Amino acid sequence: MHSEDIRKILAEHGRLLVSADKLSDESDLYEAGLTSLSTVNVMLALEEHFDVEFLDHMLGRKTFGSIRTLSQAIEQLAPATPAAAGRPAQELRA
Amino acid sequence: MNLARRSIQPAAARDSSFAALLDKVHVIGREAIAPLAEEVDRDARFPREAFDALKAEKLLSAYIPAEYGGMGLSVGEIARLCEALGQYCASTAMIFAMHQIQVACIVHHGLSTAFFRDYAREIAARQHLVASATTEMGIGGDTRSSICAVKVVDNYFMLEKQAPVISYGSYADAILVTCRRCEDAPRNDQVMVLVRQDDCTLKQLSVWDTLGFRGTCSPGFELKSIGKSEQIFPVPYGEIHAQTQHPVAHILWASLWVGLAGDAMNRARQMVRGEARKNPGVTPISATRLAEADLVYTSLRGLVSATLNEYEAMLEENDVEAFSHFGFVVRVNNLKLSASQMVLDVVTRAMVICGIQGYRNDSKLTLGRHLRDAMGASLMVNNDRILSQNATMHVGLREAS
């Protein structure tokens, strides 16, 4: 699980209306103020941090609904590009 | 979402009965709407006669499923009706379109509860006109945020909203109002509430004196209402917005713009034919201009129909997630952005073709009202805000879709 990193990114980029510290892994992020447009910024920050690329169809409630679903999505995502293999973030995850 | 096929008629019978209905709408357009369009526009008054005629034909329940007493038409058929009305009076067509958008919200998202099933029957029986109050003072035009919140105590709700615009608010039987779900909900955690005119006070805050769409009578209001909590929609507004209100609004608005542009084209065509008759054998220069204008008009029609087809296919599929995909949301926004500019382009071209006859207010080829209405298309729900939403979504999209 990447809960703590995701929580930090949400605090910085999610434009949430409640403090990210108060969110449990299951809290509904949209109820906490996440909007479909702010998911873009969260996604970009997650991509940068975890060195992954989200698929277009993942930009929705199923993936961005909670810290847990985001964490699961990040775990499932393959390395963004072959060139990314071997980067530190990649080694960390392996 | 209740998207089950609403007609059990064979396709051919359905087509011919819809064609007959469309003919009736054109008769209403010629006889009850067109003769008063100039007055409605000049006096910025509600097109009462038009709605009396539309109600007499039960057209306000056109999208209500037959089992609740309506006609059970499809979104595409409603779009054709909006287009037809747009040829006679864009304000009338706009009010009709906005009403059908609200009806679609009830039909797609309300019918799981007894209250909304009964209200659907009531719309059909009494031909109720339904308005909406989605924007709010202090928010700007972002319909996905609210300041006001609904208060629920026991089985009753209380709601107050400062609305900068409620189109035909004074003439509606009910208003669909967006608000926060409860006092401590964030701005985007919204619900929609059906507020009956009888249970609410509307204090008019401003005057609707605009360049175009004057007959929509859309001033600001302070709305205060009390009612039963069953009048709150059973699903979050976010779902209603994504699956119905946003796409249906842009499809129906663009459809009535097609009608408005079509009437401008017809006036230009009359001008061209008049000139051609004066000089048989010589194709006038204005005919070339007409052929050019037709390129834009044809593209406009194609754009509307492409978006409509995609939306109707999605309704069939009933994949509720798909309505929130950025690709689809961007395409719906693109329809608004492009169509609103194309309608103005077509009318401007028609004006050039008609020349002084289009420019005069007292000629039968006058295009002043068309031009003023067409300008509103990009300003009512501002294109720049939509474009900036699209810009953000494009950053999030890896591939063109």
Image: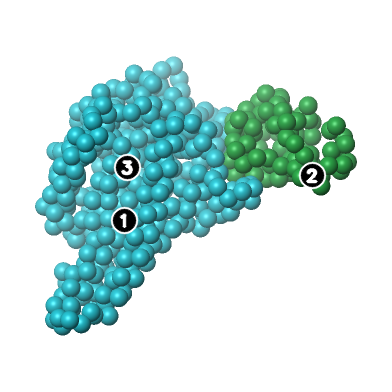
Which residue type does callout 2 highlight? Pro
Give a yes or no on whether discs 2 and 1 share a subunit.
Answer: no
Question: Could you give the CA–CA distance between mark 2 and mark 3, rounded to whole angstroms?
Answer: 46 Å
Which residue is the site of mark 3? Answer: B76
**x and y percent of residue B26 in the render?**
16, 50
Q: Is residue A10 left or right of residue B132?
A: right
**Would residue B401 be found to the left or right of residue B357 on screen?**
right
Q: Nearer the viewer, residue A46 or B301?
A: B301
- State how far apart marks 1 and 3 are (Cα): 14 Å
Residue B302 appears at what percent x and percent y? 37, 54
Chain containing the residue with disc 2: A
Picture coordinates of residue B158 (x, y %)? 42, 28
Q: Nearer the viewer, mark 2 or mark 1?
A: 2
Pointer 2 and pointer 3 on the same chain: no
| Quadrant position of residue B53 | top left
Q: Residues within 10 Å of mark 1 (few under 14, many from 20)?
A: many
Is residue B138 something that shows in the picture? no
The secondary element bearing badge 1 is classed as helix
Query: Can you give x and y, in whole percent of width and height, for residue A72 in the image?
Result: 72, 28
Chain letter, cyan in picture? B
Q: Are marks 1 and 3 in contact (CB under 8 Å)?
A: no
- Residue linked to disc 1: B258
| Residue type, mark 3 in image | Gly
Camera-side residue of B334 and B173: B334
Residue marked by disc 2: A82
Q: CA distance from mark 2 to mark 1?
A: 49 Å
- Please say if B82 is above or below B233: below
Is residue B265 visible to us here?
Answer: yes
Colour used to depict chain A in the structure image? green
- Mark 3 lies on a secondary structure that is helix
Mark 1: amino acid: Val
